[in-house]
Image (spheres, rainbow, N blue to C red):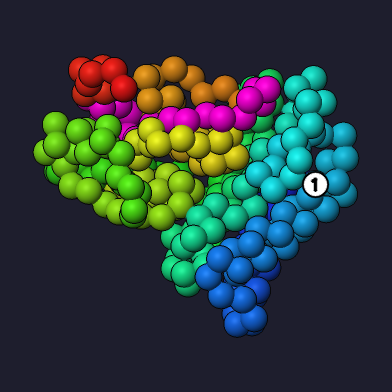
Amino acid sequence: MTDLELAKTIAEGAGKILRELRATGLFEGKALGKAGDRVANEFIMAALRENRPDDAVLSEEEKDSAARLAAERVWIVDPLDGTREYGEGRADWAVHVALAIAGKPAIGAVALPGLGQVMSSEPLPLPEIAPKPRVLVSRTRPAKEALAVAEALNGELVPMGSAGAKAMAVLRGEADIYLHTGGQYEWDNCAPAAVALAAGLHATRADGAPLVYNNANPYLPDLLICQKELAPKVLAVLRGMPAV
């Protein structure tokens, strides 16, 4: 099984487990989110140990180890991205499974179990850009930078849940720009970035710098995913903003 096939299979399998857990009705709200994090992580870690025992792993739900810093191949996973949305019974949550090779987001799979879809790092047709660019923002705390971009480009705001759901919304033709500046970790955006880059989208830090993974500190606070034609406009708006 190739790395891409493995990533897709694991993401899909974890998504199925999460759907089945929610369907039992045994957990609700935050308790459901915690249970989901736990069971999905156990499945993913077991699958990686069985199929790629020599690779390192960075998971949101596992204690980090500095040993991964010496590894060229590191699986970076978020077993349940959008815990709140999952616990609320919504569809905008995801499972992230990515492989970073020498710090680059080489392979990725983002399962959207609520939509019955898995998107991965293989070429995909890009949707057309809307006449008024649709800018994705958090459901609860839209960042001022994203609001500024929407205003400058005469765009429309699209509230949505998890990072994975937002990033894949650009590929699904539901939005045009995903700009996040409110703080993330490598597991929040490695798989989405790998999928976006493979499809031909722009995926960088908010200042246009490349995304680099497997750092000692996995905090990676900002991300820009959009159609390549829109990237210069978005970056120009951001450069014109006052320093935070």
Give the residue displayed 72% in from the left and 54% down from the top.
Answer: 41
* Callout 1 amino acid: Leu
**x%, y% of residue 232?**
26, 21
**x%, y% of residue 45?**
78, 50
88 vs 244, left or right, is right
Q: Is residue 166 magenta?
A: no
Image position of 90 with respect to 110: above or below: below
Give the residue displayed 30% in from the left and 45% down from the top.
Answer: 142
101 vs 188, left or right, is right
Q: Nearer the viewer, residue 185 or 16?
A: 185
Q: Nearer the viewer, residue 106 or 88?
A: 88
Q: Which residues are magenta?
A: 214-235
66 vs 145, left or right, is right
> Which residue is label 1 attached to?
48
**x%, y% of residue 20?**
64, 75
Quadrant hosting residue 69: top right
